[in-house]
Amino acid sequence: MTATCPNSKDTVFHIEVQTAYESSIDERILVYEALILHQTKKKRVKTLLINLDPTTKSQQLGRHDFGSVKIQYQVKNLWEQEYEELKQRVGLLPFTPYLKGGGQQQIKEASERLQQQIDDPRECAEMLFMLAILAGRK
């Protein structure tokens, strides 16, 4: 998923979600950033990896040295984030099962909030589907 922000007209924001550790993530991010720069003709790509996997290897992500090329990207470990602090952010509600304090009651609340706050039925259904998939993985 990529998005642009009007205040950063020369930057493309790349958001990547990792549900389980993959040793190739650094190489993929390097390739994605190069392709994004080539396709968009922007000057910068800012990558955020939303990490759902609390394994030791996953916690070491965020930078990689390939020798002549070095990459660095931000990693957000969702299990460290409090549900109560993030529940106002509709876009993060599908990740409720992975948030600290994201139990069954919070999953039900997240489902209700999505239905109340998203007017587009298709978008709402996609978000609820994602919430259900992630809840089923826990």
Image (cartoon, rainbow, N blue to C red):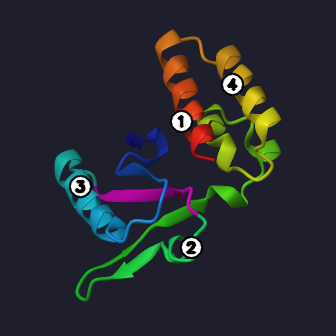
Counting other residues with Cα less than 10 Å from the Cα at mark 3, is it few (<14), some (14-19), or many (20 or more)? Answer: some
- Looking at the picture, tell me which residue is in the foreground, 55 or 39: 55
Q: Let me know if residue 74 is in the magenta part.
A: no
Q: Residue at x 38, y 45 (%)?
A: 9
Residue located beneath label 3 in the image = 37
Decide: marks 3, 1 in contact (CB < 8 A)? Answer: no
Mark-to-mark CA distance, 2 and 1: 23 Å
Mark-to-mark CA distance, 2 and 3: 27 Å
Q: Is residue 123 depicted above or below 23 in this figure?
A: above
- Looking at the picture, tell me which residue is in the foreground, 38 or 23: 23
Q: Is residue 17 depicted above or below 135 in this figure?
A: below
Q: Residue at x 56, y 56 (%)?
A: 52
User: If you read the primary sequence from the N terminus, does the residue marked by circle 3 or circle 1 appear first?
Assistant: 3
Q: Is residue 132 left or right of residue 63?
A: right
- Looking at the picture, tell me which residue is in the foreground, 106 or 62: 106
Mark-to-mark CA distance, 4 and 1: 12 Å
Which range is magenta? 43-53
Residue located beneath label 2 in the image = 59
Q: Is residue 81 depicted above or below 121 in this figure?
A: below
Residue located beneath label 1 in the image = 133
User: If you read the primary sequence from the N terminus, does the residue marked by circle 2 or circle 3 appear first?
Assistant: 3
Mark 2 or mark 3, which is nearer to you?
2
User: If you read the primary sequence from the N terminus, does the residue marked by circle 2 or circle 1 appear first?
Assistant: 2
Amino acid bearing label 4:
Ser
Q: Quadrant of residue 23?
A: bottom left
As drawn, the label of residue 111 is: 4
Amino acid bearing label 2:
Gln
